[in-house]
Amino acid sequence: MAHLVETMAYAGEVPWHGLGVKVPADLSPDQMLTQAGLDWAVEKKPAFVEIENKRILTGWNALTRSSDNSILDIVSNEWNPVQNHDAFKFFNEYCVAGDMEMHTAGSLKNGQIVWALAKVKESFELFKGDQVDSYLLFTNPHKFGQAIDVRFTPIRVVCNNTLTLSLAADTKSVVKVNHRAVFDAEKVKEMLGIATHKLAKYKEMAQFLGSKQFKEESVKDYFKVIFPSLSDQSKPHARAANIDMSRAASKAMEVLYTQPGFKYAEGTWWQPFNAVTYLTDHVLGRSSDSRLASAWYGANKNLKIKALEEAVRFAEAA
């Protein structure tokens, strides 16, 4: 099975997913680009079909990478790729402006998704020793129909869980730039504020969960909602008490009292919410790289949004 993570480099502490090659913290954007295996160009080449030994242009273009000439995607004439070099230059400018440190960079899915992670200096401590750090995830997708985006992502240090902020709670959590336009770093920087506001919003929600005590039966119902069994997914309005525990929900009950850092928030709704994030980041899935891809760009990203929203809903009823 091919790995989803193609290349990766990190500076500082080992990232939560445990993947990548360690590099010095003082690398320039170009050096980080090289160490992360991203020093290749993206080219648009006319796509054609062969009919009766004749090549006929389709009006579309193949998006290829210079390192091996492999095809990343098929795009329209109006779709302009953003080169990794230009994307990293912009991201570094943003890091400097926000007094942030570039922490990790890499690519997924054969180079279709190029990303970098920067650590924001703001953090908060929900309970003594239970720290949540703030990061910005920068994505430069080489896929038709997908835009460049910069999003806020908090990480709970004690267990290296990637957390999430519901987009319904803050519609400005993600900034996107359409590939039809020429890349304009200044415009993006104007649209995106430093992540301080996002972290304050998350702290508010985390403190609420940490202030509400749970009952074990309610936690079981919560896990049933987050991880419904296959037989019950067709009954979304059924009461949780009448739904069977799926394998994932049962596993969540197991890690509720074994996950790293559970004692910090024992008995509060912060504990079962983090059981879900720990399960998706470190237990479920085929491998570490599949969990990484899913946490930021796949099903687990949406699952964590649901987990947070449902945890707040259950906590409000506590």
Image (spheres, rainbow, N blue to C red):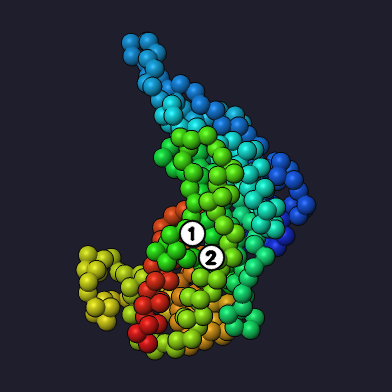
In-front residue for pair 209/220? 209
Name the secondary structure under disc 1. loop
> Which amino acid type is marked by label 1?
Ser
Name the secondary structure under disc 2. helix
Task: Give the image location of residue 293, x and y in percent.
Answer: 50, 54
Q: Number of numbered discs present?
A: 2
1 or 2: tag closer to the N-terminus = 1
Quadrant in which the C terminus is drawn: bottom left
**Left or right of residue 241: residue 307:** right
Other-residue count near label 1 (Cα within 10 Å), few / some / many at <14 / 14–19 / ≥20:
some
Residue in the image at 62% along x and 78% along y? 125
Task: Give the image location of residue 203, x and y in percent.
Answer: 54, 74
Report how far apart the C-alphas of labels 1 and 2 lie in the structure. 7 Å
Task: Give the image location of residue 225, x and y in percent.
Answer: 33, 73
Does the CB distance between marks 1 and 2 fall below 8 Å?
Answer: yes
Other-residue count near label 2 (Cα within 10 Å), few / some / many at <14 / 14–19 / ≥20:
many
**Image position of 38 with respect to 252: above or below:** above
Task: Give the image location of residue 214, x and y in percent.
Answer: 42, 87
Furthest residue in direction top, as rendered: 53
In the image, which disc is placed on residue 173? 1
**Image position of 67 with respect to 288: above or below:** above
Residue in the image at 55% along x and 71% along y? 200
Residue in the image at 33% along x and 14% along y? 51
> Which amino acid type is marked by label 2?
Lys
Give the residue at mark 2.
198
In the image, which disc is placed on residue 82? none
